[in-house]
Image (cartoon, grey):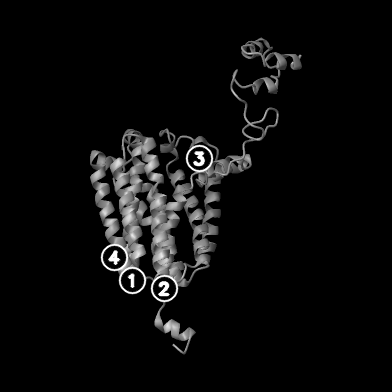
Amino acid sequence: MAALVTRLCRVPGTAAGLLRLLPAGSARPAAALAVPPHGAPGPPPGLGWEAGSGRRPLSFSAAGLVSSAPGPLQPYLRLMRLDKPIGTWLLYLPCTWSIGLAAEPGCFPDWYMLSLFGTGAVLMRGAGCTINDMWDRDYDKKVLRTANRPIAVGDISTFQSCVFLGGQLSLALCVLLCLNYYSIALGAASLSLVITYPLMKRITYWPQLVLGLTFNWGALLGWSAIKGSCDWSVCLPLYFSGVMWTLIYDTIYAHQDKKDDMVIGVKSTALRFNENTKQWLSGFSVAMLVGLSVAGINCDQTFLYYTAVATISAHLAHQIYTLDIHKPEDCWKKFTSNRTVGLLLFIGIVTGNLRKRKNPKEMNAINPDI
């Protein structure tokens, strides 16, 4: 019977009718369910769901890898936002800037430190998202974009999220303990910002400013991890630029949820700026570029660095000019494009540093005949 139905289902127009005639609860032939519409080519072997195979398509995107993970593990990976790595990039990139600026003239950045900070960025972004979702579990249920988050839908209990948070923070502490004492103290000082940031949207229209102070802490920490302490003439302008950058991209991000935020009483710079958003973003962009220029001057950067800064200015100008704050999909597109901004600056720092001449004292130490 199943073989007959399968064969008949290959005749145009018969599949739907035959399936309706089958008794309720009876097994549907897998081949019949997999038949494409008449005239449409079927998927190539090995792509997509294969009839009777039960296999998922292989995907190398972050979301695809998370969906391919074991079922019980998936809610925890989504709680860390491993399926949306843009936030990890935005946390990690300021660390790379300061590590790059702290490198010796004519040298590449310390690859060990870049790897260590990359691991820390994944863990701390995951911890921050866990804290955020624990604070916002009631709010998240009321916002369309966040309603399917693991804690909001009940895939992870409050107790389980606390245990998971403890595990992430413990691993992040192990990373921090690999640094010098100055950096350990400096890194520990950021924990208060990580914990309190999710509360700011209930108190002020400037939660994006607090996020900027939190997300760009690596601009201070990366330098101290290399040098043993902060050179504030470089680190403060770099940190300031990062905060301005966060105000740009997270204000754009916040415009996605402004309608829901107004209903549930959550505050943001998107609601504060409203139709004046582009003017504010332009001001933040100018401030960011000034800060980057000051940081470059104070650490004797070369023209390749300033070329990157000029490219970033063009990118930000295009981003703001073409932004449609009333289209969530455009806001998301502009928000994610800020990874390019961070990478451009990192490339400019590395190439600019490679153009520097090495310190004559170091050259003499290497070659006494000079």
Mark whose residue sits in front, 1 or 3: 1
**What kind of residue is marked 4?**
Val
Q: Secondary structure at mark 3?
A: helix
Whole-percent x and y of residue 148? 49, 35
Task: Check disc 2 and report the residue beneath it.
Answer: 105
**What kind of residue is marked 1?**
Asp
If you read the primary sequence from the N terminus, does the residue marked by circle 1 or circle 2 appear first?
2
Task: Check disc 1 and report the residue beneath it.
Answer: 300
54 sits left or right of 59 in the view: right
If you read the primary sequence from the N terminus, does the residue marked by circle 1 or circle 3 appear first?
3
Residue at x 43%, y 67% (from the top left corner): 185
Within 10 angstroms of label 4, few (less than 14), some, or many (20 or more) residues?
some
Given contact means CB atoms under 8 Å apart, are the residues at marks 1 and 2 in contact?
Answer: yes
Label 4 and label 3: CA atoms lie apart by: 43 Å
Residue at x 58%, y 41% (from the top left corner): 59
Label 2 and label 3: CA atoms lie apart by: 48 Å
Given contact means CB atoms under 8 Å apart, are the residues at marks 1 and 3 in contact?
Answer: no
The disc at residue 294 is 4
Within 10 angstroms of label 3, few (less than 14), some, or many (20 or more) residues?
many
The quadrant in which residue 242 appears is bottom left
Given contact means CB atoms under 8 Å apart, are the residues at marks 4 and 2 in contact?
Answer: no
**What kind of residue is marked 3?**
Ile
Placement of the N terminus among the 4 image quadrants: top right
Kindly tell me whether residue 125 is visible in this rendering.
Answer: yes
Whole-percent x and y of residue 202? 33, 44
Within 10 angstroms of label 1, few (less than 14), some, or many (20 or more) residues?
some
If you read the primary sequence from the N terminus, does the residue marked by circle 2 or circle 3 appear first?
2
54 sits left or right of 296 in the view: right
Mark whose residue sits in front, 1 or 4: 1
If you read the primary sequence from the N terminus, does the residue marked by circle 1 or circle 4 appear first?
4
Task: Check disc 3 and report the residue beneath it.
Answer: 151
